[in-house]
């Protein structure tokens, strides 16, 4: 069994390394147990609804011929397949790689390069789930996770994904709702006549020049900053890179904390969305 504390190292274009703790079999089993329980409950409710609709609207009864009963059982099978396959895809897209079980345990599915999972990867990994489930309750999947150094089942290997421990992402909306830190600004430390101090507010930055990858790295840092040993240096490097891309003076990061600059960049980007 792989070590539950194995670290997946992600290197960004800015040579900033992020470490994710790979989820082991135990935590993934607990998440799967929660999800399976929810799926079964949802299937029971939906199947009861289908049965009563067939019973009272279409006058179905068990005394009818076997054809009607076969159609009803086939419909139950379609509902079961739809929940088993669609449940995970739906939540992984809505909750950025998390199902209810994974969210409760604190896990997240992501691509092996550290970027968020897309619809294509979600479809692939959940279609292959049918193979992982064989012969009973993830028998093949558990064997694959034992063999894989990152506890990846066949679905993860096919889709290029990995399940990691998550601290909960900081979204742009939550940044906007956070207590205001004041505009990110730098004061010229060199004494001079009145007006010599130059102030640059975040509102003047052309944040539209930033790429989606720039924002992903910045958000990823904000999410994981509590666990980073070289937090100030990483923040400064990320802030300098984004300031340079926007045409602003990277030297701002020498006078203003990098985390403050990153927060203001993300908030400015949200304001322009």
Image: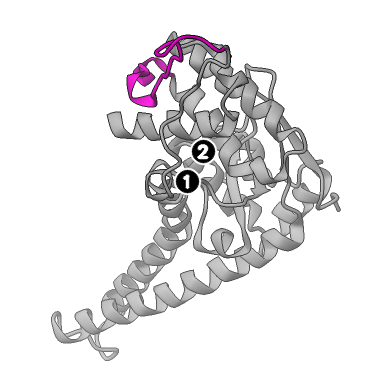
Q: Callout 1: helix, strand or loop?
A: loop
Given residues 43 and 227, the one toward you in this image is: 227
Q: x and y percent of residue 184 in the render? A: 45, 29
Please state the extent of the stretch shown in magenta in the rendering.
Answer: 191-210
User: What residue did someone put label 2 on?
Assistant: 117
Closer to viewer: mark 2 or mark 1: 1
Given residues 69 and 205, the one toward you in this image is: 205
Q: x and y percent of residue 121 in the render? A: 51, 37
User: What residue did someone put label 1 on?
Assistant: 96
The quadrant of the picture occupied by the C terminus is top left
Residue 221 seen in the figure: yes
Which of the two discs, 2 and 1, labels the residue nearer the N terminus?
Answer: 1
Q: How is the image coloured?
A: one colour
Dividing the picture into quadrants, the one containing residue 13 is top right
Q: Residues within 10 Å of mark 2 (few under 14, many from 20)?
A: many
Which residue is located at x 34 percent, y 73 percent?
70
Residue 273 seen in the figure: no
Residue 204: within the magenta? yes
Q: Main secondary structure of the magenta part?
A: loop
Establish if 51 lies above or below 171: below
């Amino acid at each position: 069994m792989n070590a539950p504390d194995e670290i997946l190292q992600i290197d960004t274009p800015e040579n900033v390394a992020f470490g994710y703790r790979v989820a082991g079999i135990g935590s993934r089993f607990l998440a799967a147990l929660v999800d399976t329980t929810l799926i079964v409950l949802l299937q029971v409710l939906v199947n009861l609804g289908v049965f009563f609709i067939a019973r009272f609207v279409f006058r179905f009864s068990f005394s009818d011929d076997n054809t009607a009963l076969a159609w009803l059982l086939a419909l139950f099978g379609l509902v079961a397949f739809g929940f088993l396959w669609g449940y995970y895809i739906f939540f992984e897209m809505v909750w950025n790689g998390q199902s209810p079980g994974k969210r409760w345990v604190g896990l997240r599915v992501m691509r092996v390069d550290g970027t968020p999972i897309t619809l294509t990867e979600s479809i692939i990994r959940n279609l292959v789930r049918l193979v992982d489930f064989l012969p009973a309750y993830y028998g093949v999947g558990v064997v694959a996770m034992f063999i894989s150094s990152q506890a990846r089942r066949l679905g993860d290997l096919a889709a290029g994904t990995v399940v990691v421990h998550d601290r909960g992402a900081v979204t742009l909306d939550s940044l906007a709702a956070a207590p205001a830190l004041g505009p990110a600004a730098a004061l010229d430390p060199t004494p001079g006549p009145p007006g010599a101090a130059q102030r640059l507010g975040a509102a003047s930055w052309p944040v539209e020049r930033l790429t989606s990858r720039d924002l992903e790295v910045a958000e990823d840092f904000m999410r994981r900053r509590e666990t980073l040993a070289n937090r100030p240096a990483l923040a400064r490097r990320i802030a300098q890179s984004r300031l340079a891309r926007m045409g602003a003076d990277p030297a701002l990061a020498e006078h203003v904390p990098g985390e403050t600059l990153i927060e203001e960049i993300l908030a400015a980007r949200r304001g322009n969305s």
